[in-house]
Amino acid sequence: MSGMERKELRIVGFLCNWCSYGGADTAGVSRFKQPTDLRIIRVPCSGRVDPLLVVKAFMEGADGVLVSGCHPRDCHYAEGNFYARRRLEVLKRFLPFMGIEPGRFEYTWVSASEGARWQKVVTEFTNQIHRLGPIRRKGDGGGDIR
Ligand code: FES
């Protein structure tokens, strides 16, 4: 079975409007083949992604969450991605204490012109989530989500 034919999982992507959303759009316009598991939420800046939004996405059923913003020093609001990096790095270390495997969450930087990079990022992250499988919830005999 090829990577494009498997059962979809629920992956949420918070993408900043100015860079990563543009990168995803560039990938789409360029007709780069991508997995379809990702549900994109466009945000003004990665700095606006409260870590609790990521936790809420997991609590609401996401199997994986990806945050993507502008490259460092390219943020439309100058330093939003620096704040994002600081907060999301702490969140990444905290998630295992909530029973969420560290591989289920990533943050990265993709510019609007990097359609090929977006394709690579989303494909690799989706493959990683598929390797981990659907997230286990309380009552499934597994993790502690919910
Ligand atoms: Fe893209 Fe701030 S505007 S990360």
Image (cartoon, helix red, strand yellow):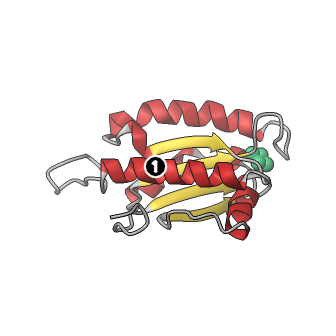
Q: Is residue 41 above or below residue 19?
A: below
Q: Is residue 63 above or below residue 99?
A: below
- The answer to whether one can see residue 49 in this image is no
Which residue in the protein does label 1 denote?
A: 55
Q: Residue 95 vs residue 71: left or right?
A: left
Q: Is residue 91 above or below residue 30?
A: above
Mark 1 packing: few (<14 Cα in 10 Å), some, or many (20+)?
some
Task: Give the percent coordinates (x, y) of residue 42.
Answer: 68, 62
Task: Give the percent coordinates (x, y) of residue 14.
Answer: 61, 55
Q: Residue 57 vs residue 26: left or right?
A: left
Q: Which residue is at a point 57% across and 37% down the rendered structure image?
A: 88
Q: Which residue is at a point 71% across and 55% down the rendered structure image?
A: 115
In the image, 70 versus 122, the foreground residue is 122
In the image, 42 versus 3, the foreground residue is 3
Q: Residue 141 vs residue 13: left or right?
A: left
Q: Secondary structure at mark 1?
A: helix
